[in-house]
Image (tube, helix red, strand yellow):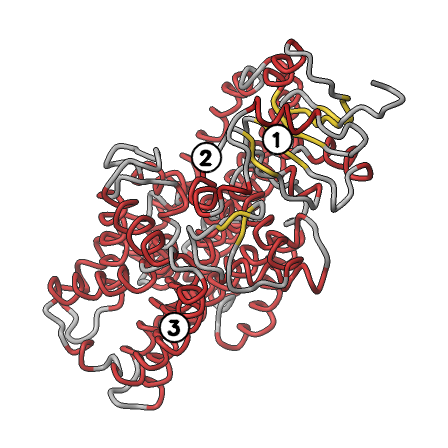
Amino acid sequence: MSFISDKSNSSFFSNKNWGYQHLLWLGLLSLIWLGTLGWRHLIPSDEGRYAEIAREMFVSGDWIVPRYNDYLYFEKPPLQMWATALVFKLFGLGDWQARLWCGLTSLASIILVGVTCRRIWGVRSGTVSALILASSPLWFIGGHFNSLDMGVAFFMSSALCCLIQALYSENNSNQERNWMIACWVMMALSVLSKGLIGIVLPGFVLVVYSLSSMDWTSWKRMHWVKGLIVFFVIVTPWFLLIIEDQASFFHFFFIHEHFERFTTKDHQRTAPWYFFLPLIAVGFLPWLMQLPFAISQSFKERQSQPGFKPLWLCLCWVVAITFFFSLSKSKLPGYIFPVLPALAIMTGVWVTQLFEQHQTLQAQRNHLWQIQMIVFGIMFAIGFFFISKISKTGEVYEADLYANYAQMITLALSVGVIGSLLAWIFRNQIIKSFLIFSWSFILVCLTAGMGHESVGRLLSGYDMAQKAKPLIQKTDPLYSVGMLDHTVPYYLEHPVIMVNYMDELEFGITQEPGRWIPTVDQWIDLWEQHLDQKAFAIMGWNTYKQLVEKGVKMQIISEDPIRIIVGKPSPSNP
């Protein structure tokens, strides 16, 4: 039976039913999205790093100059650290507090995508596009992981949505002006989130769109004077304050972190040019079979629709940003986050047509949808044959942890199989089928992601830190010998003094060389002076064994298979 003939389903996303049904699924999604932020402990390196920078900002009260382990840290602007420090002030320290900004911005993107599509393509497109983004694995992971990438992805995709709504509005109307000013605000906040890409990439996309569509009217509708004033009012104050306070900031941030990072391999994050293509495929996996048709629809819009072409703009957004980061010598998975909302808009508009076209065309597309359910059911079932490989991952001491993680992956695959089967059973009621499939993928991502705590708890060093924390006072020196642990200082609420190791703190150390100890021998001399003074150190097990062989007196106060915390032995227990 065709979906169109199903009266109950055909009205499911009607304007009449929009309010309470939309609020119902949005409330449920918000509960799942935000309520699970604290289910995992922070893992290295981004999660611990940005939590600790925000914690030090909150403790010191210095909201201008970011520091990491009390060293100058100018790699990124401070917007997310400001927000997280404020969260710490309001709610205290914790795992969910450290991730709250990423959780809120990722959820807000889902809502904004839904609002944008609802206005331009209708109620159904709004809900469908929002659920497509929410069920995309890469977006779900990004929304539950403390890094800067989700924040900048939110503001950049918000700039896209605001631009679409501005250009969709009547020319020279108040709506056009307000949405366009909002677009400039979002670009400014993107810059404060992660740097110049916040305005460079949207500008690049607009050039690509105009050249490829020959639609130059958007340039006349940008409200340049008001927009630039708003942009610089938001962006300029912090940059002026920190440049005035720290003369070295300008070269490091604008030259090293932008130009040199893009053109050189200094950050050792190299990858082949096609690095982001399989990442997009996996990150957008549930909707990959629909994506070619969505892309084709964007091309048709470019050829046949006069004036503004929103779907073509979304495709230009995806292609231009992917191309830009593919050229970069520095690549990380989070860089590609901003393309997912645009993909969700394109695919959502296409998938909505499964619900609305006339019966002949509907039957053809419904057949495609049925094939998708079968393919994913088989894919999840095949996954069971690879479960045993998970327990063989990592070091020997991690075997039991990965075995537990394998159980959670088994549960996630089971949810995927059941969800795909139920979606296929309701294949002739295609809205129900879509809802079942999208929500099952959200649960798959939730189960697999939260299950990583089986391994992540050890990586975080949380248990080791909690054992040592009561013994280490705020004024006691805490050294990090031959390593930089990104999570333990946060859980100890105590920055470390680096010993014989710089890593990403090299810039800050070179600016304030008196804040570190260049060699292990110098540290040993300092450690052995004043034995009655308390001091502590974090190190790896190999370093500990080497120091024991040298006769350095240390007392183990906390340990795990990865690292160890030692203290000076008391005079009564040398």
432 with respect to 172 (left or right): right
- Give whichever of discs 1 and 3 has the lower sequence position: 3
Which residue is label 3 attached to? 236
Q: Nearer the viewer, mark 1 or mark 2?
A: 2
How packed is label 1: few (under 14 Cα within 10 Å), some, or many (20 or more)? many
Residue 237, image quadrant: bottom left
Disc 3 on helix, strand or loop? helix
Looking at the image, which residue is at 64% across and 25% down? 525
Q: CA distance from mark 2 to mark 3?
A: 30 Å
Q: For the residues carrying marks 1 and 3, which lies nearer the camera in this image?
A: 3
Count residues near mark 2 (Cα–Cα under 10 Å), then give few for <14, some for 14-19, many for 20+. few
Q: Is residue 258 above or below residue 380?
A: below
* Residue pointed to by mark 1: 459
**Residue 567 vertical placement versus 145 (above, below):** above
**Residue 53 appears at what percent x and percent y?**
57, 51
The relative height of residue 179 versus residue 463 in the rendered view (above or below) is: below
Q: Amino acid at mark 3?
A: Thr
Instruction: Please state the horizontal and vertical placement of residue 345, each as a whole percent of the image.
Output: 36, 60
As drawn, the label of residue 503 is 2
Residue type at mark 1 is Leu
Using the numbered discs, state the Cα–Cα distance from disc 1 to disc 2 in whole angstroms.
19 Å
